């Protein structure tokens, strides 16, 4: 049996705006039927790191909040604190960043909460009994809400190939402990000959695993380069794209598949207590090559495509990656190959990452189906 994914392109007219299309997408996944009066409704999104510009615009979140209130629910916008040190690593800075990007109650019509508390340790242990995790650590405010609306900016990601609903649920709903447990087996390595000794990677390492050393080169000359201590590394991967010379590289091994499976198990845990009370939206707009956790947004890899909705988190991500790969690639972006329609844009960005693992594993553990029917509204 196929799952249903609804799709709207971005074409509009005076009598049918993009907000009207968003309303229809919400209707098709039965938003009204999922909300009882006074239900607390978590609208899970990514506020974007300070300086990022690719996140879903606040005006769309306002429309979602309006529909929730129309059905007597009590919406709130939420995300969790980051593992790395940045503008969202604790709730005060996180809220300041969110407000700076326009996510305030006066704009979106709903309060903004950081789901895992001041320092990322407000969490609930959820029993899932899966192959890797028996319990997962889910942010308290997300777990305690009756309804969850996953609102995701679809983009590339250096560890999972792409970042969609599964990442928004798995990584985005995890507490700090949960994020650590997902990343802990992945240790990047510095290619010393490419390292310029700029030290820009140092403040991005939450585990203080990066230090500067002065190895002697074959010519007898010593220079300062970075080195990562694998015993201290928590595997967050944030140093990879912060390196301007590309010297920090992931050691591609089984840790990447394991990371994706861990992330999917956390996604399962995030919605475990919300049977038939979840729905998901993927915004295929400004599809950047990397995560919104970076303080910048590189050129989109394809044109803006549209918005999808579904009750199946696996199907909506499968449909999203298919739609992206059906597009002609943007030759002015970070893509260096696979520009033709039908070619894999995400493997072009991250050749060693098999993004299909997260989808196959999601299907395997009963989170959703990869087989879908795409219905255009």
Image (tube, rainbow, N blue to C red):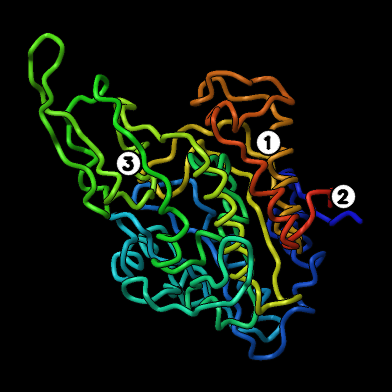
Say which label, 1 or 2, has the lower sequence index.
1
Query: Residue 264 appears at what percent x and percent y?
Result: 61, 57
> Badge 2 is on which residue?
373
> Badge 3 is on which residue?
239
Disc 2 secondary structure class: strand
Say which label, 2 or 3, has the lower sequence index.
3
Give neighbour class at mark 1: few <14, some 14-19, many 20+ (Cα, 10 Å).
many
Query: Residue 330 appears at what percent x and percent y?
Result: 58, 24
> Badge 1 is on which residue?
324
Say which label, 3 or 1, has the lower sequence index.
3
Question: Quick check: marks 3 and 1 in contact, CB under 8 Å?
Answer: no
Is 237 situated left or right of 372 in this image? left
- One can see residue 376 in this view: no
Looking at this view, name the residue that lies furthest to the top.
219
Residue 36 in the image: above or below residue 300: below
* Image depth: mark 3 or mark 1 in front: 3
Front position in the image: 157 or 18: 157
Q: Residue at x 66, y 28 (%)?
A: 344
Query: Residue 120 appears at what percent x and percent y?
Result: 36, 71
């Amino acid at each position: 049996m196929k799952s249903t994914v609804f799709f709207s392109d971005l074409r509009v007219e005076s009598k049918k705006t993009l907000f009207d299309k968003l309303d229809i997408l919400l209707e098709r996944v039965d938003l009204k039927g999922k909300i009882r009066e006074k239900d607390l409704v978590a609208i899970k999104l990514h506020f974007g790191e300070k300086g990022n510009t690719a996140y879903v615009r606040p005006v769309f979140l306002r429309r979602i909040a309006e529909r929730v209130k129309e059905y007597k629910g009590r919406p709130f916008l939420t995300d969790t604190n980051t593992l790395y040190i940045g503008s969202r690593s604790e709730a005060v800075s996180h809220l300041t960043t969110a407000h700076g990007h326009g996510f305030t109650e006066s704009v979106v019509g709903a309060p903004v909460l950081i789901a895992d508390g001041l320092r990322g340790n407000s969490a609930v242990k959820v029993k899932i009994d899966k192959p890797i995790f028996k319990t997962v650590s889910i942010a308290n405010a997300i777990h305690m809400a009756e309804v969850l609306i996953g609102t995701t900016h679809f983009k590339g990601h250096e560890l999972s190939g792409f970042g969609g609903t599964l990442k928004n649920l798995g990584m985005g709903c995890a507490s700090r402990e949960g994020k650590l447990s997902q990343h802990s087996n992945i240790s990047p390595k510095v290619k010393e000959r490419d390292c310029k000794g700029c030290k820009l990677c140092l403040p991005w390492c939450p585990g203080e695993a990066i230090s500067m050393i002065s190895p002697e080169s074959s010519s007898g000359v010593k220079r300062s380069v970075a080195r990562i201590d694998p015993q201290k590394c928590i595997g967050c991967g944030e140093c990879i794209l912060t390196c301007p010379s590309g010297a920090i590289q992931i050691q591609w091994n089984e840790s990447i598949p394991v990371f994706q499976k861990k992330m999917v198990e956390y996604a399962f845990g995030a919605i475990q207590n919300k049977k038939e009370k979840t729905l998901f939206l993927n915004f295929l707009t400004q599809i950047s090559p990397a995560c919104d956790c970076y303080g910048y947004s590189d050129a989109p890899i394809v044109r803006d495509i549209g918005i999808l909705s579904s009750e199946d988190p696996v199907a909506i991500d499968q449909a999203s990656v298919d739609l992206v790969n059906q597009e002609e690639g943007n030759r002015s972006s970070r893509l260096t190959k696979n520009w033709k329609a039908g070619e894999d844009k995400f493997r072009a960005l991250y050749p060693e990452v098999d993004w299909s693992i997260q989808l196959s594993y999601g299907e395997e553990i009963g989170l959703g189906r990869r087989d879908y029917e795409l219905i255009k509204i």
